[in-house]
Image (cartoon, helix red, strand yellow):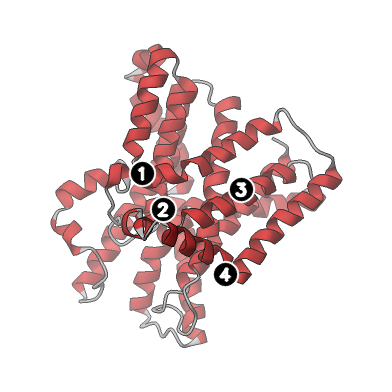
Amino acid sequence: MRAQFSTYLDAVRFSACMAVVCAHFTFSQFIAGVPYQGDLAGIAVTVFFVLSGYVIAYVADQKETTLKQYAVSRLARIYSVAIPAIVLTLIIDFYLMHHGVGDWLPSYEYRGMWKYLPVFLVFGSELAGFHAVVFGDGVFWSLSYEVWYYVAFATFFYLRGAYRIVFGLVSLLILGPAPLIYFPIWILGAVIYHTHKRISVSPNIAKYGALLTIGAIIVLLALGALGDADYMANQLFNGWPRANLHDSMNFASYYIVGVLAGAHIFFVQYCHLTFLSGQRIKRAIVYAASFTFAIYLSHRPFMNFWAYVIRHDPSSITSISLLGALVLFSCWLFGFISEKQKGRWRTLFRRLLNLRAAPLRAA
């Protein structure tokens, strides 16, 4: 993977994360008079899925050549942020409930924590038709999808023969209808990676292709066409998507954006990204992107916490600016105790999986 292209993907990943944060700031309790920008959040999550599929295909092909290597890296990447994020959410939720606020929090989950917490720790909140918000952190749904995409991918990539067929089918059944609907979007990223190994285009064609695809996404967002596509799809299926698919109900817009985002990534690989050749801009982008996962999983709890602490006024520019600054600063600090500790978690899982090294090699 070319250094400039890798840096560009980091920039896209960080931008998508910030788009999610900005979209969540448009909830009425944070900013008054601005409609919720759900389409923006949907675009960002779709881009995450395509990027994830591309990067996982790359590392599995070039770096993590065994199932054990793959498992160690994925477990360290996920749990280094997910466990601290769950602990953070619990602390903030309990704090808010103790002070008599947080009516929106799922109190039934706290009453039954003995059964919900184990499910959340294995990212089962959206599997096999089950649906539950992970305490007060609503963004966990996409991670529950993605983690099990990792599992499904591994069964087909690393296993052979009957193991591949049996465990592959089981992994797809575990996903259930809602996550399975978005799985092709994730797989598209992996397909693009392997397409890059076989097909190339000229820099001029790539430049226009990259501009047209990103321009198309911006136009669709500005015209509200993505929301219209979801509405028509829901009408076509007599309301079944909205009634049954939960976070996958907007599949029409996700597929449109997924195809455009995938095409954009395909073309960008062949562009001359000279503006990313400088060491300063590269270091800045890589550093910012290294906090992406931490920002994504922690911003919602921090928004709830700081909004209460500062007695946030959603109609005040000063209060909105202060809330935004506090949330981003808190997410940055959270990154040091989560995402920046990935190496320690990798060491832990490497030691744990060594206890099961023989079965993994046999697989």
Residue 346, compared with residue 209, is above or below; it is: above
Classify mark 1: residues with Cα within 10 Å, few (<14), some (14-19) or many (20+): some
Residue tagged by mark 3?
259
Q: Residue at x 39, y 14 (%)?
A: 162
Q: Are marks 1 and 2 in contact (CB under 8 Å)?
A: yes
Which of the two labelled residues, at mark 3 and mark 2, occupies the earlier sequence position? Answer: 2
Q: Position of residue 187 (x, y in %)?
A: 53, 37
Q: Residues within 10 Å of mark 3 (few under 14, many from 20)?
A: some
Of the numbered discs 4 and 3, the one sitting upstream in the chain is: 4
Mark 4 to mark 3 CA distance (whole Å): 18 Å
Q: In front: 65, or 248?
A: 248
Q: Position of residue 16 (x, y in %)?
A: 57, 57
Real-space Cα separation, disc 4 to disc 2, in angstroms: 19 Å
Going by the image, does 262 lie left or right of 108?
right
Circles 4, 2 touching at the beta carbon (< 8 Å):
no
Residue depicted at x 27% and y 61%? 91
**Among the two numbered marks 4 and 2 on one chain, the one whose residue lies closer to the N terminus:** 4
Rendered position, 265 above or below 87: above
Q: Is residue 127 visible to us here?
A: yes
Q: CA distance from mark 4 to mark 1?
A: 27 Å
| Residue 196 rendering spot, x and y as whole percentages | 70, 33
Residue that mark 1 sits on: 177
The residue indicated by pointer 2 is 248
Q: CA distance from mark 3 to mark 1?
A: 20 Å
